[in-house]
Amino acid sequence: MGKDKLRRFEENKTFPNLFQASYDEVFQKDHPLKGLWKQKVFGNENPLVLELGCGKGEYTLALARRNREVNYIGIDIKGARLWRGAKTSQQEGLKNVAFIRTRIELIESFFAPSEVNAVWITFPDPQPRKENKRLTSARFLERYLNFLVPHAQIHLKTDSRSLYDFTREVVRGWPGMILLESDPDIYNGKRMPDDPVITVRTFYEKQFLEQGKAITYLKFSTGNLSRVNPEEA
């Protein structure tokens, strides 16, 4: 492991808004802040929005700058990437930003029922050979339903057309879920210039655009928060 990465890991321990928990600490156990993020971390009752697989936190930070009356938490397993987001938020004095280092598979250990208002999933691994590991699979959506408020919105941005198509079919086949927006190319000139879907670009998104890839976007609502798995309906 390089010295720079080790330095970042050490600095991560000093950030008051970066929370790290080992696998054993949260596997089938509740994190101490579960149900208390708004009160104990942000000190308010503002809406709470998550970015899953946030990487360096570009989306988390950009949304937090635009919406100071909303709390944002970026989640990723890569500590060296989270370092950038946590450090930037401290340098800018953003009080409505926090980060969690954990696996998305353990996310239910961190959030209580109806604690989260919305979710962004930005350029996740499309997992071409492992459908149940996709962050928009029924397996993961079931997890999110356990902590989302009724009628919460979930946003997906991806360069993977296969993941886009897969997710759209999952949503259409899920009782109670509502597909709000489906765009196979967000840079087709039809969006308003200040739309955060196009004005906020992650590191990977810029790379994909340089490669000539179309960036897709889905927005859907959880409806009345039915926890019925579509495969069992």
Image (cartoon, grey):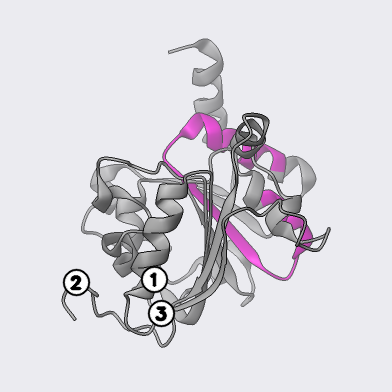
Instruction: Looking at this view, name the residue that lies furthest to the left.
Output: 232
Q: Secondary structure at mark 2?
A: loop
Q: Which residue is mark 3?
A: 177
Q: Residue at x 41, y 41 (%)?
A: 125
Residue 40 in the image, given as x and y percentages of width and height:
54, 66
Which stretch did the figure color magenta? Answer: 61-88
Residue 60: x %, y % from top left: 63, 52
Dot 2 or dot 1, earlier in sequence: 1
Assign a secondary structure to mark 3. Answer: loop
Residue contact between numbered discs 2 and 1, judged by CB atoms under 8 Å? no
Q: Is residue 74 left or right of residue 92?
A: left
Mark 2 residue type: Glu
Q: Which residue is mark 2?
A: 231
Question: Is 142 left, or right, of 149 in this rendering?
Answer: left
Other-residue count near label 3 (Cα within 10 Å), few / some / many at <14 / 14–19 / ≥20: many
Q: Are marks 3 and 1 in contact (CB under 8 Å)?
A: yes
31 and 149: which one is in front? Answer: 149
Judged from this view, the residue extending furthest toward the right is 193
Residue named by callout 1: 171
